[in-house]
Image (cartoon, rainbow, N blue to C red):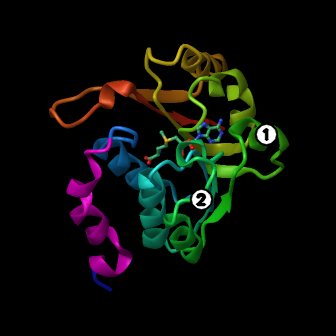
């Protein structure tokens, strides 16, 4: 089977289309999500905050490459005036379970499932307040990523505090080298050490 069959090349070749929208994650961090997924091989993935779906596409490309994995996405549709954007039907066709419109807090406090990979980019003002609940949704050995862990959202400090309290391995990626990226917003990768 060629690499194209795994959708890896298709993902990489499209990358120039992904870097301009400031509401999305940066291209560098998209590649990181994709790489983490193809390296970790998670079976259950959760995305909090779909936005334009760029991180979603990175996870889906990883799932396709791996040949295993199911993705659940949660969004309150605040960025879409409470109406589902048309691309949601395409995500559903690709097997994504979409839970919307549902606020992140309601989902995190009521969810009884566990996940191997969590991408958090929804309620930037408040998600730090329930960082411990998000952590509880992640299986040991799993990875959770948090976008916008910078100075803009004061409560994002609470995410870092939670991670440090548990002593999990972590790395915050916030360096830019290109004029078209805004990585300073901060992309935190955390491994829930067993
Ligand atoms: C910045 S966008 C996510 C961008 C996405 N990571 C990407 O790369 O395209 C944030 C998303 O979270 C959703 N959102 C905002 N507040 C939320 C909340 N309290 N609960 C659930 N979703 C929320 C918005 O509707 C929006 O779709």
Q: Residues within 10 Å of mark 1 (few under 14, many from 20)?
A: few
> Left or right: where does residue 15 sit relative to residue 85?
left
Question: Quick check: is 5 in the magenta stretch?
Answer: yes
Residue lying at the far bottom in this picture: please name it. 1
Mark 1, residue position: 106
Question: For the point 56% across and 77% down, which residue is it?
Answer: 93
Helix, strand or loop at label 1? It is helix
Question: For the point 54% across and 13% down, which residue is it?
Answer: 154
Q: Which percent across, then down, holds residue 123?
A: 61, 32
Helix, strand or loop at label 2? It is loop
What is the distance, in whole Å, between disc 1 and disc 2 at their CAs? 19 Å
Q: Which percent across, then down, holds residue 182?
A: 29, 31
What is the tally of numbered marks visible in this picture? 2
Label ID, residue 84: 2
Q: Which percent across, then down, holds residue 140?
A: 68, 43
Question: For the point 58% across and 47% down, which residue is it?
Answer: 81
Q: In front here: 90 or 132? A: 90
Dominant SS of magenta comes to: helix
Which quarter of the image is occupied by the N terminus?
Answer: bottom left
The answer to whether residue 42 shows anywhere in this view is yes
Nearer to us of marks 1 and 2 is: 2
Q: Which percent across, then down, holds residue 87?
A: 49, 66
The answer to whether residue 39 shows anywhere in this view is no
137, above or below 10, in the image: above
> Left or right: where does residue 2 sit relative to residue 100?
left
Q: Residues within 10 Å of mark 2 (few under 14, many from 20)?
A: some
Q: In front here: 130 or 140? A: 130
Report the magenta residues as a range: 3-21
> Left or right: where does residue 2 sit relative to residue 76?
left
Question: Quick check: is 192 in the magenta stretch?
Answer: no
Which comes before the other along the chain, label 1 or label 2?
2
Q: Quadrant of ligand 1?
A: top right
């Amino acid at each position: 089977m060629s690499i194209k069959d795994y959708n890896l090349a298709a993902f990489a070749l499209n990358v120039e289309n992904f870097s301009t929208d400031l509401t999305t994650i940066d291209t560098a961090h998209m590649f990181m999500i994709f790489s983490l997924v193809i390296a970790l091989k998670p079976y259950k993935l959760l995305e909090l905050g779909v936005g334009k779906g760029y991180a979603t596409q990175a996870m889906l490309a990883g799932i396709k490459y791996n040949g295993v994995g199911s993705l659940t996405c949660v969004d309150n549709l605040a960025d879409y005036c409470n109406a589902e954007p048309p691309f949601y039907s395409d995500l559903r066709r690709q097997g994504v379970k979409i839970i919307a419109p549902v606020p992140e807090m309601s989902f995190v406090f009521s969810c009884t499932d566990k996940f191997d990979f969590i991408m958090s980019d929804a309620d930037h003002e408040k998600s730090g307040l329930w960082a411990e609940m998000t952590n509880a949704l992640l299986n040991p050995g799993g990875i959770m990523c948090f976008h916008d862990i910078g100075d803009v959202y004061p409560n994002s400090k609470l995410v870092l505090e939670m991670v440090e309290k548990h002593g999990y391995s972590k790395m915050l990626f916030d360096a830019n080298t290109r004029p078209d990226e805004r990585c300073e917003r901060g992309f935190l990768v955390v491994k829930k050490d067993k």
